[in-house]
Image (spheres, rainbow, N blue to C red):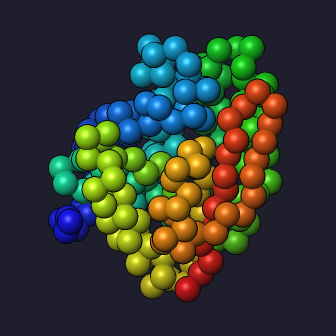
């Protein structure tokens, strides 16, 4: 199925983009480990997306396709998440007994994060009724074409093993498996520069 070209989602579109991601990640192992209670998930996950995506919305690297049926948030080379803001969101939205384990998981992921300039994909999601229709691939192809023009690598993490083949079809390679007791397994993936 052919889809329209992805469009840039601006700061005015932030609420629509985040709503799509909230729906798309409702069964994600990592996000539901962070926020197992539905009301905490709805409030906490949207704040986490907003914190991680703040610079992406400002720099035009959030893309949507088919009227926000799918959304991808990318952080470009030399754009890093605001760790203090993300930490504040974690501290204020995750159940206090779980926070030390969450910080341990984030530290493990940070050790595997590339140090060279790269494109980072913290979130790519498609609304459930439209999943497995090619919208995720459309979003990936769009952003990866820019990474290729810049000869820059790309990086992501997924907690859903079912997503690994999708990313592999787009040139990502499994870089590691992150296992922290009582947390879901996470799979960092790197796409070398082309």
- Looking at the picture, does residue 23 appear above or below residue 138? above
- The answer to whether 133 appears left or right of 120 in the picture is left
Q: Residue at x 30, y 61 (%)?
A: 134
- Looking at the picture, does residue 138 appear above or below residue 57? below
Q: Is residue 111 visible?
A: yes
Q: Quadrant of residue 133?
A: bottom left
Q: Position of residue 84 (x, y in %)?
A: 66, 37
- Looking at the picture, does residue 149 appear above or below residue 181? below
> For the image shown, how many numbered marks are present on the structure?
0
Q: Quadrant of residue 141?
A: bottom left
- Looking at the picture, does residue 151 appear above or below residue 99? below
- The answer to whether 100 appears left or right of 5 in the picture is right
Q: State the residue in front, 130 or 103.
A: 130
* Image quarter in which the C terminus is found: bottom right
Q: Residue at x 33, y 53 (%)?
A: 132
Q: Position of residue 166 (x, y in %)?
A: 47, 62
Q: Position of residue 68 (x, y in %)?
A: 24, 47
Q: Is residue 58 visible?
A: no
Q: Quadrant of residue 97?
A: top right
- The answer to whether 82 appears left or right of 51 in the picture is right
Q: Position of residue 79 (x, y in %)?
A: 56, 60
Q: Residue at x 65, y 14 (%)?
A: 95
Q: Residue at x 26, y 47 (%)?
A: 130
Q: State the residue in front, 114 or 175.
A: 175
Q: State the residue in front, 163 or 82.
A: 163
């Amino acid at each position: 199925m052919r889809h329209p070209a992805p469009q840039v989602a601006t700061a005015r579109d932030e609420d629509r983009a985040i709503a799509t991601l909230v729906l798309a990640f409702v069964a994600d192992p990592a996000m539901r480990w962070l926020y197992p209670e539905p009301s905490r998930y709805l409030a906490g996950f949207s704040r986490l997306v907003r914190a991680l995506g703040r610079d992406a919305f400002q720099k035009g690297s959030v893309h949507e396709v088919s009227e926000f049926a799918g959304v991808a948030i990318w952080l470009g080379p030399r754009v890093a998440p605001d760790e203090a803001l993300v930490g504040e969101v974690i501290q204020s939205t995750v159940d206090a007994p779980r926070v030390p384990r969450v910080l341990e998981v984030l530290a493990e992921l940070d050790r595997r994060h590339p140090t060279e300039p790269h494109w980072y994909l913290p979130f790519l999601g498609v609304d459930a009724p439209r999943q497995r229709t090619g919208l995720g691939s459309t979003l990936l192809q769009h952003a990866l074409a820019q990474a290729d023009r810049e000869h820059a690598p790309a990086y992501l993490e997924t907690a859903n093993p079912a997503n690994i083949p999708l990313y592999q079809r787009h040139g990502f390679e499994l870089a590691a498996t992150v296992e922290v007791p009582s947390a879901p397994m996470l799979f960092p993936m790197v796409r070398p520069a082309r």
